[in-house]
């Protein structure tokens, strides 16, 4: 819930970003707004005490729709920021976006919005994990490049740290969603549901919790870094360059 709160709190600055003209800022704003909305609706439907029935299904469906749109926004953001001129990246963005839409359509048609181990749910989980994983891979690549430049005095330490924070939260969320996907795959393959392997299930839930907490902290520091934290980043860079 901590990371979910961070996404919700990012909604206000995301709205301000959306007023600007930069496509990357619009994609980032859309991603955070839709992710906060989607997670909130999904948690309300699954864990929020809404009785099973038409209302819970509608809320869950709306949450899945928002998260699928967030997936499209993240594919778009990653391509614009990290691979703006690469044809293969533009193709990957289009394929990922179309797949996200088709995945939600399959989920809606086969009733996956109220069956957590449906094949369509596994598909959309895999697509969402892929969108985070691509952003993580690109952030990691840029972070490593920026660290080398900082060491040579050619880049700002706070900018390099920002890439590191994006690498942290996208990696943490990739691991969390991957844990959810593996758990659901295991439950579906066994035919005995999510409770077949209590120890495995507890470990997966623990991974998700840790991943969400880490991502929440990294996202918060990315957008609202305290002055003390920025001073620490600068001092650390100075020590490394000596």
Image (tube, rainbow, N blue to C red):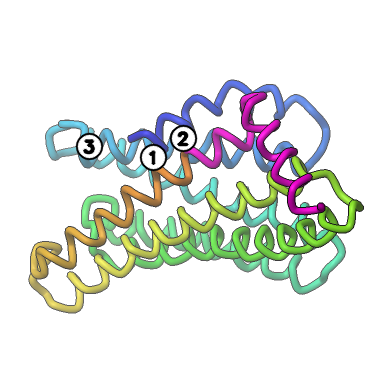
Q: Specify which label sits upstream in the sequence, 2 or 3.
A: 2
Q: Using the image as rendered, state which of residue 59 and residue 75 is in the foreground.
A: 75
Element on which disc 2 rests: helix
**Marks 1 and 3, how far apart in space?**
14 Å
Name the residue: 70% across, 31% down: 231
Name the residue: 46% across, 35% down: 36
**Marks 1 and 2, how far apart in space?**
5 Å
Element on which disc 1 rests: helix
- What kind of secondary structure does the magenta stretch mostly adopt? helix
Name, please, the residue furthest toward the bottom. Answer: 189
Element on which disc 3 rests: helix
Which region shows up in magenta? 217-242
Which residue is denoted by mark 2 in the rendering? Answer: 36
Horizontal and vertical percent for residue 227? 67, 24
Name the residue: 83% across, 44% down: 156
| Closer to the eye: label 2 or 3 | 2
Which residue is denoted by mark 1 in the rendering? Answer: 39
| Closer to the eye: label 1 or 3 | 1
Which residue is denoted by mark 3 in the rendering? Answer: 56
């Amino acid at each position: 819930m901590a990371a979910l709160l961070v996404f919700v709190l990012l909604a206000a600055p995301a709205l301000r970003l959306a007023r600007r003209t930069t496509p990357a800022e619009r994609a980032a704003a859309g991603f955070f707004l839709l992710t906060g909305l989607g997670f909130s609706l999904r948690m309300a439907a699954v864990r929020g005490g809404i009785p099973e029935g038409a209302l819970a299904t509608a809320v869950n469906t709306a949450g899945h729709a928002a998260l699928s749109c967030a997936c499209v926004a993240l594919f778009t953001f990653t391509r614009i920021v990290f691979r703006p001129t690469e044809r293969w990246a533009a193709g990957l963005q289009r394929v990922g976006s179309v797949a996200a839409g088709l995945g939600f359509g399959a989920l809606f048609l086969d009733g996956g919005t109220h069956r957590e181990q449906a094949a369509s749910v596994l598909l959309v989980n895999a697509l969402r994990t892929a969108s985070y994983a691509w952003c993580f891979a690109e952030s990691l690549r840029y972070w490593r490049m920026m660290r080398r430049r900082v060491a040579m005095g050619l880049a700002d330490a706070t900018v390099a740290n920002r890439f590191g924070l994006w690498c942290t939260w996208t990696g943490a969320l990739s691991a969390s969603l991957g844990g959810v996907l593996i758990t659901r795959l295991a439950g579906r393959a066994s035919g005995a549901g999510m409770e077949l392997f209590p120890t495995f299930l507890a470990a997966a839930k623990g991974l998700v919790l840790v991943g969400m907490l880490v991502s929440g902290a990294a996202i918060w520091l990315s957008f609202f870094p305290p002055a003390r934290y920025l001073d620490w980043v600068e001092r650390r860079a100075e020590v490394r360059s000596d």
